[in-house]
Image (cartoon, rainbow, N blue to C red):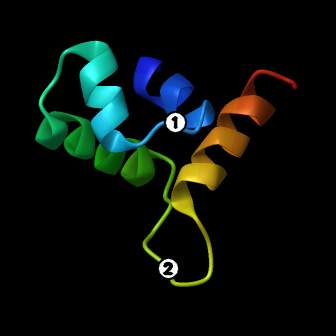
Amino acid sequence: MEVLRLIAEGRSNAAIAGELFLAAKTVETVCTSIFRKLELHPSDHVNRRVLAVLTLLRAEGI
């Protein structure tokens, strides 16, 4: 959830890694896991980071 919150703030994977004291590869793995759980497949037409944040907002009733 912390990674997703930082994605919602517009942070890059590198910025998230720095904020959470994680390796960039770890953040990439977490993002991939989030996308998989939300069934957000790679696409040239949509931004999965934005869709993940929208899914979070909807779940929280915002």
> What residue is shown at x 19% (from left), y 15% (from top)?
21
Which residue is at a point 55% across and 24% down the rendered structure image? 5
Q: Would you say 29 lies left or right of 35 here?
A: left
- Please give left or right for residue 24 compared with residue 16 in the image: left
As rendered, which of 33 and 4 lies closer to the eye?
4
Q: Residues within 10 Å of mark 2 (few under 14, many from 20)?
A: few
Residue 2, image quadrant: top left
The quarter holding residue 34 reads top left
Whether residue 15 sits left or right of residue 11 in the image: it is: left
In percent of width and height, residue 9 lies at 61, 30
> Mark 1 and 2 residues: CB-CB less than 8 Å, in contact?
no
Q: Is residue 58 above or below residue 46?
A: above
Quadrant for residue 31, please give it.
Answer: top left
Residue 34 is tagged as none
The mark that comes first in sequence, 1 or 2, is: 1
- Depth check, mark 1 against mark 2: the one in front is 1
| Location of mark 1 (residue) | 7
Q: How many marks?
A: 2
Q: Tag 1, which secondary structure?
A: helix
Tell me where residue 55 appears, x and y as whole percent. Answer: 68, 41
- Position in image of residue 47 (x %, y %): 58, 65
Disc 2 target residue:
43
In-image side of 27 versus 52 (left or right): left
For the residues labelled 1 and 2, the Cα–Cα distance comes to 18 Å
**Residue farthest toward the bottom in the current orientation of the protein:** 44
Give the secondary structure at mark 2: loop
Amino acid tagged 2: Ser
Q: Position of residue 35 (x, y in %)?
A: 43, 51
Nearest the eye: 38 or 1: 1
Residue found 33% across the figure and 17% down from its top? 19
Q: Amino acid type of disc 1?
A: Ile
